[in-house]
Amino acid sequence: MDILYYCQNKQCQNAQETPYVLTLKLDDVMDEKNMAQMYCPHCKTELKKEEPKT
Ligand SMILES: [Zn+2]
């Protein structure tokens, strides 16, 4: 099972044509509470697990 993290920045979504999505394997996220917060490499916005509203 994969975990998807989405960039929520609408301006970034427009600039990138498709929203930036980071895919992690569940195995890589064994201890989710202790995971570092991840950021979009394009706009530095926090990535969230929810799909961005369009
Ligand atoms: Zn972004």
Image (cartoon, rainbow, N blue to C red):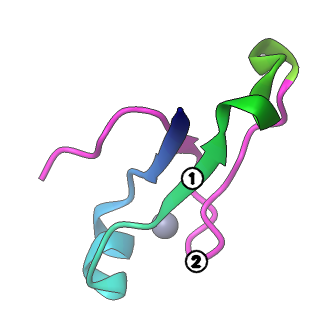
- Left or right: 5 with respect to 26? left
Give the residue displayed 34% in from the left and 67% down from the top: 19
- Image coordinates of residue 3 in percent, x first then y, are 54, 36
Residue 41 magenta-highlighted: yes
Residue 7 magenta-highlighted: no
Which three-letter amino acid code belongs to the residue tagged 2? His
30 over 6 or under it: above or below: above
Disc 1 crowd, CA 10 A, few/some/many (<14, 14-19, 20+): few
4 over 43 or under it: above or below: above
- Image coordinates of residue 32 in percent, x first then y, are 75, 19
Rounded to the nearest whole Å, what is the CA distance between mark 2 and mark 1?
16 Å
Give the residue displayed 49% in from the left and 37% down from the top: 48
- Image coordinates of residue 10 in percent, x first then y, are 28, 63
Which three-letter amino acid code belongs to the residue tagged 1? Thr
Disc 2 crowd, CA 10 A, few/some/many (<14, 14-19, 20+): few
The boundaries of the magenta stretch are 35-54
- Left or right: 22 with respect to 10? right
Some atom of ligand 1 lies within 8 Å of the CB belonging to the residue at label 2: yes
Query: Of 33 and 10, which appears nearest the observer?
Result: 33
| Main SS, magenta residues | loop
Query: Of 25 and 52, which appears nearest the observer?
Result: 25
What residue does disc 1 label?
23
What residue does disc 2 label?
42
Q: Which SS class for mark 1? A: strand
11 over 33 or under it: above or below: below
Give the residue displayed 38% in from the left and 59% down from the top: 9
Q: Which SS class for mark 2? A: loop
Of the two numbered discs 2 and 1 in the rendering, the one whose residue sits closer to the viewer:
1
Give the residue displayed 38% in from the left and 51% down from the top: 8
The count of marks equals 2
- Image coordinates of residue 11 in percent, x first then y, are 32, 72
